[in-house]
Image (cartoon, rainbow, N blue to C red):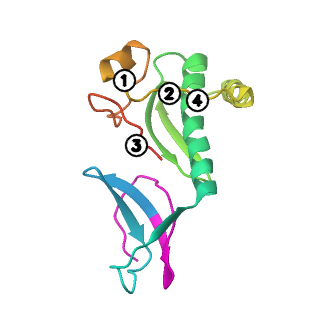
Amino acid sequence: MIRHLSMQVGDTGTISNPEETVRVVNTYKENDLIIHEIENVPANPHLIFRAKVDLQKRIDTAANHSATHLMHAALRQVLGKHVAQKGSLVNDKELRFDFSHFAKMSDFEIAHVEHIVNQKIREDVPLHEDRSIPKAEAEKKGAMMLFGEKYGEKSSDDHI
């Protein structure tokens, strides 16, 4: 298997042609190129391949990614504005959210955060996010820029 030591969770799926199908185990962006990590090298890599994304995995990963944003907002609401995300792991099966706070959370605080997140999920608010605006304008509108997010002068839609 060809593997890049990437911490990013990207799409998976297959690339295929009439002669063979190769499993794509991860994708990531590097130098404005989308790199496909594949299980094995095709027998004839010069042929034209059709890419097919594992759509359910993409949908599930996107849902967990959105949940990290909801959790961050709920933690700040319950524990205070000093709470800051310090890292996370997001994939199609789970999420882990690392954050700073000066004390262990109580059972009540955990339940309150869970209630807020679940309530927001049930609201099913459509996402209308414009990532094409300049960074300064996004910050003015209240966007949080966390640990070197992927925003240039203009933000882009290059996540999952």
Q: Any magenta on residue 13?
A: yes
Q: Residues within 10 Å of mark 3 (few under 14, many from 20)?
A: few
Q: Nearest the camera: 44 or 145?
A: 44
Above-or-below relation of 96 to 4: above
Q: Name the residue at 35% across, 79% down.
A: 45
Q: Nearest the camera: 89 or 151?
A: 151
Q: Name the residue at 54% across, 20% down.
A: 76
Q: Name the residue at 60% across, 36% down.
A: 67
The disc, 2 or 3, on the residue closer to the chain's N-terminal end is 2
Mark 4, secondary structure of its residue: loop
Q: CA distance from mark 2 to mark 4?
A: 6 Å
Q: CA distance from mark 2 to mark 1?
A: 10 Å
Is there CB contact under 8 Å for labels 4 and 3? no
Which residue is label 1 attached to? Answer: 133
Q: CA distance from mark 1 to mark 4?
A: 16 Å
Q: Position of residue 156 (x, y in %)?
A: 37, 35
Extent of the magenta region: 1-25
Q: Which three-letter amino acid code belongs to the residue tagged 2?
A: Glu
Most extreme residue toward the top is 140
Which residue is label 2 attached to? Answer: 129
Which residue is label 4 attached to? Answer: 127
The disc, 1 or 4, on the residue closer to the chain's N-terminal end is 4
Q: Name the residue at 61% across, 42% down.
A: 63
Q: Is residue 47 visible?
A: yes
The disc, 4 or 3, on the residue closer to the chain's N-terminal end is 4
Could you say which quadrant of the image residue 47 lies in? bottom left
Q: Which three-letter amino acid code belongs to the residue tagged 1?
A: Ile
Q: Position of residue 14 (x, y in %)?
A: 51, 69
Q: CA distance from mark 4 to mark 3?
A: 16 Å
Q: Any magenta on residue 2?
A: yes
Q: CA distance from mark 3 to mark 1?
A: 14 Å
Which residue is label 3 attached to? Answer: 158
